[in-house]
Amino acid sequence: MKKIPAILLLALTVLFGYTSCKQETKDKMKETGEEIQQTAEDAGNKVVEKGEEIGDKIATEWDQFSSDAQDKLTRIENDIKAKEEALAKENKAQREKMKKEVDKQKAELNKLKERLREKNEAFRKDMKEAGDTAKQKREAFEKEFKNDMERLGDAIEGLFKKG
């Protein structure tokens, strides 16, 4: 008869210990899931920040190039104007010959100005689209990742409910 209370006490202790461990494990799994989610969000934010830094650096480098190119084009334009002024001092034959050359240079200068303007517009458009695309991809990733974490958390809870 003494064995029954001892066995009953032992069974209750094991059952209580199992239930306690089960709850601790469940709590620990939930904490781990939350930590993983936070780590993923932090990593996603760092990727976005790094992308913004890179975008800013690229934009700064492009702005510097564009500014330098515009300065050079302005110097060339001034040189062409100086050549045109010098043409007035030349004889008629020399003036006609040089005018053709100056006109070619003017046409080339205008082509370069137009190319730079077009590339500036294209660059700004590309940067905006890249930023929009990156934001959309990040938001889609965050949504998918959160859903995956929810499913994992639900699966873990379901596992312990079955057990």
Image (cartoon, rainbow, N blue to C red):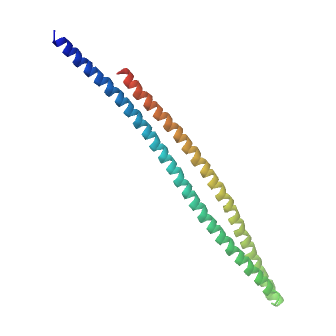
Q: Residue at x 52, y 40 (%)?
A: 142
How far across and how far down the image is residue 4, in percent? 19, 11
The N terminus lies in which quarter of the figure? Answer: top left
Q: Nearer the viewer, residue 56 or 11?
A: 11
Horizontal relation, residue 31 to residue 65: left or right: left
Given the current orientation, which residue lies at the most extreme top position?
1
Horizontal relation, residue 145 to residue 130: left or right: left
Q: Residue at x 69, y 69 (%)?
A: 112
How far across and how far down the image is residue 121, in percent? 69, 59
How far across and how far down the image is residue 16, in percent? 29, 22
Q: Residue at x 26, y 18 (%)?
A: 12
Q: Nearer the viewer, residue 7 or 160?
A: 7
Quadrant of res 140: top right
How far across and how far down the image is residue 143, in percent? 53, 38
Q: How many marks?
A: 0
Horizontal relation, residue 146 to residue 98: left or right: left
Q: Nearer the viewer, residue 135 or 80?
A: 135
Quadrant of res 88: bottom right
Horizontal relation, residue 161 to residue 78: left or right: left
Determine whether 60 is above or below 144 in the image. Answer: below
The C terminus lies in which quarter of the figure? Answer: top left
Q: Nearer the viewer, residue 86 or 138?
A: 138
Determine whether 147 is above or below 60 in the image. Answer: above
Determine whether 157 is above or below 100 in the image. Answer: above
Q: Residue at x 73, y 81 (%)?
A: 79
